[in-house]
Image (cartoon, rainbow, N blue to C red):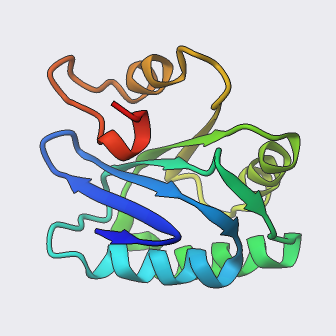
Amino acid sequence: MSNPQYKFNVDLQAGCIFIKHYGVFNLEMVTERIELVRQHPDFQANISRVLDVSDCEIEISTDDIRSLIENISRDIDKRGSYKEAIVVNSQLAHGMVRIYESVKPFSQIEVQVFNGDNPNVWAEVRSWLGLAPDIRLPEFLTGC
């Protein structure tokens, strides 16, 4: 699924939802994307996510993070446990992810932040998620 502000792919074989954001990363855009992913016919609440915001201008406040947590909390009982790998390339984005991680009241989601400037970032994400070697990451994430 594609939009000028994000692309995503629900890959049931990988057990993962792959998401790439572009441009401005703000509450309105993230909320829209969350709803579209939830409506996808292959969506399963308990599969891992890879969220790449490394090419984004972050315009999200701590109040926005609380709103996102409320949105996620609506169906947290249906989600089960999963991992969320978040790829960033700025101190601001890294800080916002750490705030999200520290204030979320649920433990079902295990979050790990990865540095998008690291040339081995995708190998590290694959390893942390435990993706099988034959699983190909979407081109919109890796560029190849």
On-image quarter of the C terminus: top left
Q: Is residue 118 above or below residue 125?
A: above
Which of 117/72 is in front? 117
Q: Quadrant of residue 28?
A: bottom right
Which of 98/4 is in front? 4
On-image quarter of the N terminus: bottom left
Residue 12 position within the rendered picture, expressed as x and y whole percent measured from the top left: 15, 50
Residue placed at 76% from the left, 59% from the top? Answer: 57
Which of 80/52 is in front? 52
Q: Is residue 30 left or right of residue 40?
A: right
Residue 102 position within the rendered picture, expressed as x and y whole percent measured from the top left: 79, 52
Q: Is residue 136 above or below residue 58?
A: above
Residue placed at 57% from the left, 16% from the top? Answer: 119
State the count of labels.
0
Q: Is residue 78 left or right of residue 92?
A: left
Q: Is residue 92 left or right of residue 15?
A: right
Q: Quadrant of residue 105?
A: bottom right
Residue 133 position within the rendered picture, expressed as x and y whole percent measured from the top left: 21, 17
Q: Is residue 13 left or right of residue 117?
A: left
Q: Is residue 80 above or below residue 86?
A: below
Residue placed at 47% from the left, 76% from the top? Answer: 33
Residue placed at 27% from the left, 82% from the top? Answer: 39
Residue 104 position within the rendered picture, expressed as x and y whole percent measured from the top left: 70, 61
